[in-house]
Image (cartoon, rainbow, N blue to C red):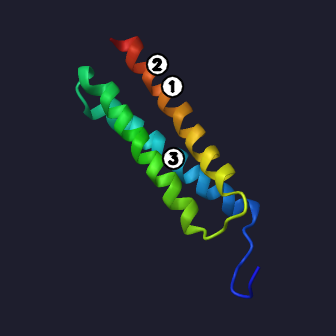
Amino acid sequence: MTDTEVPLTPAVTFAGIVAVWILAAVGAVVVLAAVAPEDRFGGLCLSLAVCAIAAFCVQLATRRRDGFVSRVVASFVGSVVITAIAGIVVAATL
């Protein structure tokens, strides 16, 4: 660790992960509210793709190598779970 590196606290690490989860929840709500019923699964896929890119961007912004893969996986798995719940809601309403 160099003099300019600030170690990440668990709260900072968790905040980056939760930010992506919130993005997934907002994306799911927007898709459920604003997209036509026959296009909702495609909208959820697009929302999940945006969350995947956001997960990489948020974790790259921390500029820390230690635990990078674990943080990205935690961000993305949470996004997949949230999107899956929204997909179940879409399937139940068809």
Query: Between residues 26 and 71, which one lies in front from this camera angle?
Result: 71
Residue at the spot of label 3: 22
Amino acid type at circle 2 is Ile
Number of marks present in the image shown? 3
Check the image and report above or below for 69 versus 26.
below
Q: Are marks 3 and 1 in contact (CB under 8 Å)?
A: no
Amino acid type at circle 1 is Ile
SS under mark 2: helix
SS under mark 3: helix
Check the image and report above or below for 92 versus 62.
above
SS under mark 1: helix
Q: Which residue is depicted at the point 25% across and 25% down?
A: 39
Check the image and report above or below for 9 versus 76.
below
Q: Which residue is depicted at the point 38% across and 33% down?
A: 45
Q: Circle 3: is it few (<14), some (14-19), or many (20+) Cα within 10 Å? A: some
Image quarter of the C terminus: top left
Q: Which residue is depicted at the point 67% across and 63% down?
A: 12
Q: Is residue 16 left or right of residue 5?
A: left
Q: Position of residue 73 (x, y in %)?
A: 62, 45
Whole-number angstrom distance, CA of label 2 to CA of label 3: 18 Å
Residue 68 placement: quadrant: bottom right
Whole-number angstrom distance, CA of label 3 to CA of label 1: 14 Å
Residue at the spot of label 2: 88
Q: Circle 1: is it few (<14), some (14-19), or many (20+) Cα within 10 Å? A: some
Q: Circle 2: is it few (<14), some (14-19), or many (20+) Cα within 10 Å? A: few
Q: Position of residue 31 (x, y in %)?
A: 33, 34
Q: Which residue is depicted at the point 46% across and 46% down?
A: 51
The circle drawn on residue 85 is 1
Q: Earlier in the sequence, mark 3 or mark 1?
A: 3
Q: Are marks 2 and 1 in contact (CB under 8 Å)?
A: yes
Amino acid type at circle 3 is Ile
Residue 60 placement: quadrant: bottom right
